[in-house]
Image (cartoon, helix red, strand yellow):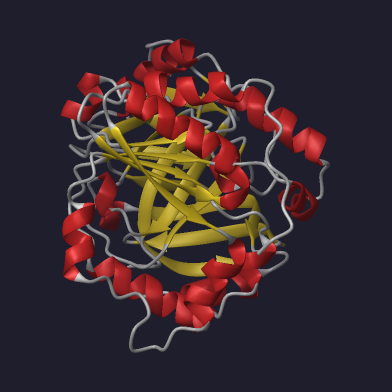
Amino acid sequence: MNNINFPHISDIDKVAEHIVNKCLRVKPNEIVNIRGGIHQYPLLTKIQIYVHKNGGYGILDIRDDETTIALINEIDDEHIGKIPKGIRDLQDQVDVEFILYPNYSLAADRRKDLKKNALRNERIAQYDKERKSRALIMEWPTAPKAETYGISLEKLEKIYWSAFWADLDKLTSEAAVIKNKLQGAKKVTITSENGKTLEFAINDRPIWVDTGCFTEDLVAAGDLTKNLPCGEVYCSPIEDSANGNVLFQKVFHNGNWIRDLELTFTNGRVSQVTATEGKEIFENVLKMHSGDKDCIAELGIGLNPNVPETIGNTLLDEKVVGSIHIAIGKNTMYGGINKSSLHWDLVAMHPSVTADDKTIMSKGKLELTNGSQ
């Protein structure tokens, strides 16, 4: 097991109460699966207590890096990734999933057997179906992660907690403006920092907002996934409508950077890849996955003003105000049709974005009025 340090949070009770009551909004008799790492145990148990205070029932699912690796590397191909029907039936009874990323060190990802991990993901993907439970996914800063990103733990924690405590009411108001502009758009145009453009349609695809809270209206509309830290508007483009080029200045994967990654989409699929550094990393990721791994999956627009820069952590990076992200791979959870073992968010900084005749972003600056360009 890892040599770990428990988190130092000035008010762990306040954090847990915020998660359960403000974000998850747990109701009496709801079953909440609480997943995380052993190093996060104090917060996980405090969340469990608040779930029970609300009349719900919290189930703890505790993990550690060494066991996670062993459950991939040491399992025969015959058994890896298989989920018995009884467990799937039990999962169907869960009303809420709280997932605190359990990895203590990103180095654990580099120690996974890539072929076995891909087989595991492919098999788990076979069990996918329409999810009815709310899912809140949360990131967590640790010293090994900060070292991998090349920054101090103090800086990572400052970015993280500043983003965590962003003004959710303000984010909700701004997200509503962006959602309104994207709704029903027949032509979305992304102009990258290098001047090249990517175009696609959204049409009647649903527009989702992540402001960290499960309101009754969002749940009723089927908007069932949120992040902490939060702050984005996202949707699934009409897959085969995507044509053109998009530039991602820095893409982080397993401790390595891909720089100036430019993807060309033809009828929704990646048809050409260029990069000034790390092109082979991108190509190797695609080789390890199955299904619609090279198909456009998502457009996301970052809104969190307290995330100042990209550092290599996708959940934080995609929330940077003035950024967008384009994902490839699976998107059935967002109303799309792609089925894949991969969903990969790629962040682009300082783009311009229009939806039909409405400006959403101009060279990385959000346009939060309702007017046309």
Q: Quadrant of residue 305?
A: top right
Q: Residue at x 69, y 65 (%)?
A: 107
Judging depth in this view, the residue of 288 and 108 nearest the camera is: 108
Q: Is residue 140 above or below residue 178?
A: below
Q: Observer-nearest residue: 128 or 267?
A: 128
Q: Residue at x 59, y 32 (%)?
A: 320
Q: Is residue 96 left or right of residue 136?
A: left
Image coords of residue 156 (percent x, y): 74, 37
Tally of numbered discs: 0
For image coordinates 53% across by 13% down, the residue present is: 167
Residue 111 placement: quadrant: bottom right
Residue 147 image offset from top left, x and y in percent: 80, 52
On the rendered image, what quadrant is the N terminus found in? Answer: bottom right
Measured along the vertical axis of the image, is residue 138 above or below residue 307?
below
- Relative side of 195 to 5, left or right: left
Image location (x, y in percent) of residue 349: 62, 39
Residue 195 appears anywhere in the view: no
Please, is residue 43 above or below residue 342 in the view?
above
In the image: residue 7, left or right of residue 318 = right
Q: Which quadrant is home to the C terminus?
A: top left
Viewer-proximal residue, 117 or 201? Answer: 117
Q: Residue at x 60, y 63 (%)?
A: 65
Compared across the picture, whether 96 is left or right of 325 comes to left
Q: Is residue 30 visible?
A: yes
Q: Which x, y percent locates residue 116?
A: 46, 81
